[in-house]
Image (cartoon, rainbow, N blue to C red):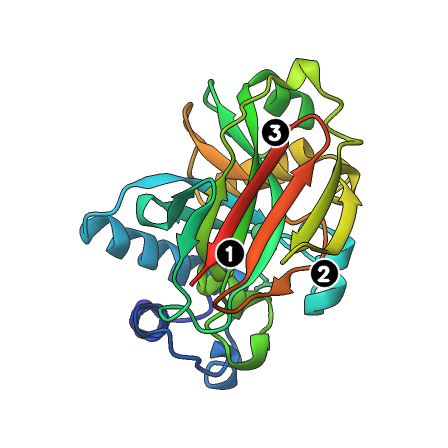
Amino acid sequence: MTLTLSRSDIERLADRVEAAQDNARAIPKLTDDFPRMGLADGYAVQSELRRRRIRQGHRLVGWKAGLTSKAKMLQMGVDVPSIGFLMSNMARTDNAQVRTDDLVHPRVECEVAFVTKKDLHGPDCTRDEVLAATDFVLPAIEVIDSRFAGFKFDLPSVVADNGSSARFVTGARARDVADLDLRTLGVVFEKNGVSIGMGATAAVLGHPAEAVAMLVRVLAELDEPLPAGSFVMSGGITEAVAVTAGDHVVARYQDLGSVSVRFI
Ligand code: 0L1
Ligand code: MG
């Protein structure tokens, strides 16, 4: 990927995003001040943030595919999927409580999570390779939180903000992909007992393993592999929905069980 910004601009933008994430403070999208910023620059800022989080003592546990459904792309006004990294301090267990006072304006997405058992890498990674390398899948909810005011951003800015990653919650029931039709799995998404979305996993690039293959191909452009043992969120099946303190969110999956989270 070819950068248009200088190394010092990348560091300045990483400072901006890091401060916004740490202080739960909304900022304008980065391209307002850096109009020449492109997708490669967005990933350079994201990589700098990842290095900083590791230096701060957090562990890289995996990656997320984002903007992987037509519903999400339409909702956010972009037409290309993206990836972001997941650190140990973002992980929550089923039915965990997630604080809202250290988030800007959280939203939830229901997703299928993959855990890999073999290394994946390279620009030609396919859905079948992903399925062969998958140890198991889990039901999951992603809590996203764009650091950009009003969730208004473009692709380079949202990539720099690590794809709006904030928290992720995993259900306890691990399933073998051989025992599921991962393309047609249905999900009902509920907030406070009321349905807020319904869908099937085909909404995610036709098949959620396709989103994982896309992620591996983007990682290849960044010269990174997806090592065995990685945890991967494959992308929202329905639109993201806003949550506030007091909300209880449940994703009920066909054949995968359910996963829930409570906001305080
Ligand atoms: O996980 C996602 O699909 C979110 C990607 C970033 C866009 C957003 O903040 O909605
Ligand atoms: Mg997501």
Residue beneath disc 3: 125
Q: Position of residue 108 (x, y in %)?
A: 58, 57
Is disc 1's CB within 8 Å of ligand 2? no
Q: Identify which residue is drawn at 33% across, 52% down.
A: 50
Q: Where is residue 238 in the image (x, y as percent from the top left)?
A: 72, 52
> Would you identify the image quadrant in which residue 60 lies?
top left
Q: Can residue 1 be seen in this view?
A: no
Q: Return the disc, 3 or 2, that comes first in the chain's sequence.
A: 2
Residue beneath disc 2: 73
Q: Identify which residue is drawn at 53% across, 50% down.
A: 142
Q: Return the disc, 3 or 1, that comes first in the chain's sequence.
A: 3
Q: Is residue 5 visible?
A: yes
Under tag 2, what secondary structure? helix
Foreground of the two, 80 or 184: 184
> Would you identify the image quadrant in which residue 207 lies?
top right
Foreground of the two, 29 or 150: 150
Residue beneath disc 1: 143
Residue type marked 1: Val
Q: Distance between the residues labelled 1 and 2?
A: 17 Å
Crowdedness of circle 3 by 10 Å Cα count: few (<14), some, many (20+)? some
Front position among marks 3 and 1: 1
Q: Return the disc, 1 or 2, that comes first in the chain's sequence.
A: 2
Answer left or right for 33 relative to 201.
left
Residue 57 vertical placement versus 39 (above, below): above
Answer left or right for 220 relative to 73.
left
On the rendering, which quadrant does ligand 1 occupy?
bottom right
Answer left or right for 56 relative to 88.
left
Under tag 1, what secondary structure? strand
Residue 32 vertical placement versus 13 (above, below): below
Label 3–label 2 contact, CB within 8 A = no
